[in-house]
Image: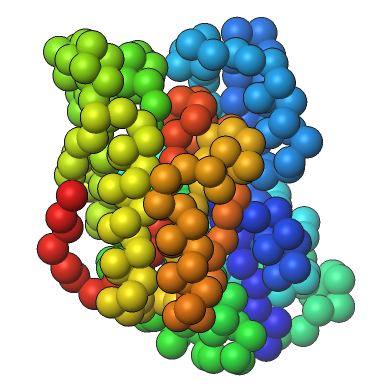
Amino acid sequence: MRMGLAVDASCDLPQAFLQQHNIVVMPIAVKVDDETFLDERNPAEIRRFLDRQLGSRSHSAETEPCSVRQIENLFLERLVLEQDCVFCLTITATRSPIFDHVNRASFAILKSYREVRKQAGVPGPFMMRVIDTRNLFAAEGPATIEAVRMIDADEPPAAIRERLLHVANNTYGYMLPRDLYYLRARAKKKNDRSVGLVSAMLGSALDIKPILQCHRGETGPVGKARGFEQGAQMLFDHATRRVRAGLLVPAMCVSYGGDLAVLAQLPGYAELRAACAETGVQLTEAPMSITGMVNVGEGAVTLGFAAEEHEVRF
């Protein structure tokens, strides 16, 4: 059976990894003022976004994920012919309509694929499974990496689906923003009350940065640091401890909203790299998606891993 993967553009995995495993990216259109960027994890388009130095204007951006019709077309014109089963992994449904769009599209796809495959001379049935990763950005990575491993091992679709749901339920995502004013402005734009004016003012005045966690679709602060560099040290120290304690998926996924050379210089990152190398954990480093940057601001760090339930201490 030919099995493949599709992810949305907010999944922060390296372009080389996506291409190596023939992972299809469902694009997201990002409109800032009168400019449109097509977010499909293309490094050149990410570079164009960064080079434009849109700064604080990005918080007012409009993001348009693939519509139900566009997803139907992607599958019926391409994927139902190339694969016999496709797993679609999406950003958490609590933060984006993408999961709902793919689910709705699946009904029309599964109703129409037979005639499409028949006309192309492709025998047999087609299946698609939609998985909510219950996380976002770099933390969409562990489930995707595990899906690649299981597909390469020729595991049956039912086993893959069950495993991916387990991984999604046990993935911990973290974010360290640079600019709380930006984060609050973006939250206000999206009617999200998770970042208040008082906390934004206090954070900027004292240079206090929150460490935010996403777990099972719920997001909120789990720690705070005096300055971005101290926050990075705390976050990477936590990740290093989890690597040494053991992970459900041997992967640690990190993204940065800018030049990846900056990521390598942040306090605590060298120790995380060393721990991953010593324990055989795959460390993926990727530029944050354009979608991610307009939502949390340039210069932010996101990180994700799958692990057994544990106490989060910062």
304 lies above or below 129: above
Q: In the visual, does 19 lie left or right of 163? A: right
Tell me where residue 314 appears, x and y as whole percent: 18, 49
From where the camera sits, is residue 8 visible? Answer: no
- Which x, y percent locates residue 52? 69, 16
Q: Residue visible at 29% across and 67% down?
A: 241
Work out whether 22 lies above or below 300. Answer: below
Position of 70 with respect to 216 (left or right) is: right
* Residue 59 in sight: yes
Residue at x-position 40% and y-position 39%: 96
Q: What colour scheme was applied to this rendering of the protein?
A: rainbow
Residue 100 in picture, x, y percent from top left: 42, 48
Outermost right residue: 120
Q: Is residue 278 left or right of residue 248?
A: right
Reply above or below: 152 against 209: below
Q: Quadrant of residue 36?
A: top right
* Residue 84, above or below 10: below
Image coords of residue 259 (percent x, y): 63, 36
- Residues 51 and 240: in front is 240
